[in-house]
Amino acid sequence: MNGAQLGAFVVASVLLILIPGVDMALVTRQVVVHGRRAAFATLAGLAPGGFTHTTLATIGLSAVLTASATAYTAVKIIGAVYLVWVGVQTLWAARHGATNDDGTVEVGAGAPRRHVNLRQAYLTGLLCNITNPKVALFYLTFLPQFVARDANVTAHTLALGLLFCAMAISFFVVYILALARVSGWLRRSAVQRTIERVTGTVLIALGLRLAIDR
């Protein structure tokens, strides 16, 4: 791969990373509702999901999702149901507040951060990424466009996939830190509930779109 091809890949990757999607919706909600630690835990779950899809695309297993309608449908349904479930939970929390481990409900004028299990935050990120077949298809169709025909396809595909993952992780680290700086304003009750409603609606819409996608 020459410099021009690498530059084109970087530009295309940045534009794709900046497009709001499931990852951004999840991370935004975690920062606003649970704080920076929960957001980083979710990002820690999203990262291995991306690495997994890169590996699958590299060795060709992702092609199974393209060739097998049954396999694609099964993974798609699982991913869609999970996204809708997370979205419904988010809307429920926005409407009724969240219950802490001691049974109290935190719905005050200042809308303090709600306690969250970091392991649960990690699994949310991991499952949302792993169970989305469109992510696998993205890696399978996007990466090969930048692999030279005379190159080692396996090595170059893996390298590009890892570079894309590193860029995405770097962006979200900066995004989380920047969002956390204004989290005091974002945690105001009215603002927080609005963000949760929007996030929950987006997650449900993305889940339904994934379910009906052909």
Image: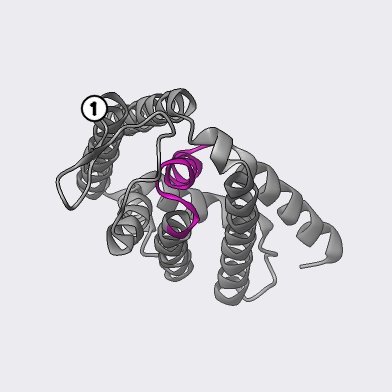
Examine the rendering and report whether any part of residue 160 can be seen: yes
Q: Position of residue 202 (x, y in %)?
A: 41, 28
Residue 2, image quadrant: bottom right
21 over 140 or under it: above or below: above
Quarter of the rendering occupied by the C terminus? top left
Q: Position of residue 183 (x, y in %)?
A: 55, 42
Secondary-structure class at tag 1:
helix
Which residue lies most toward the front here? 109
Which residue lies most toward the left here? 103
At 61% from the left and 65% from the top, the residue drawn is: 166
Magenta region includes residue 36:
yes
Count the numbered circles shown: 1
Q: Specify few, some or many for label 1: CA neighbours under 10 Å numbering under 14, 14-19, or 20 or more.
A: few
Q: Amino acid at mark 1?
A: His
Q: Nearer the viewer, residue 107 or 167?
A: 107
Quarter of the rendering occupied by the N terminus? bottom right
Q: Nearer the viewer, residue 134 or 113?
A: 113
At 39% from the left and 30% from the top, the residue drawn is: 196
Residue 213, image quadrant: top left
Magenta region includes residue 151:
no
State left or right for residue 95 relative to residue 156: left
Residue range corresponding to the magenta coloring: 20-37
Q: How is the model colour-coded?
A: one colour
Residue receiving disc 1:
96
Q: Position of residue 98 (x, y in %)?
A: 25, 38
Q: Main secondary structure of the magenta part?
A: helix
Examine the rendering and report whether any part of residue 214 can be seen: no
Q: Position of residue 30 (x, y in %)?
A: 43, 47
193 over 27 or under it: above or below: above
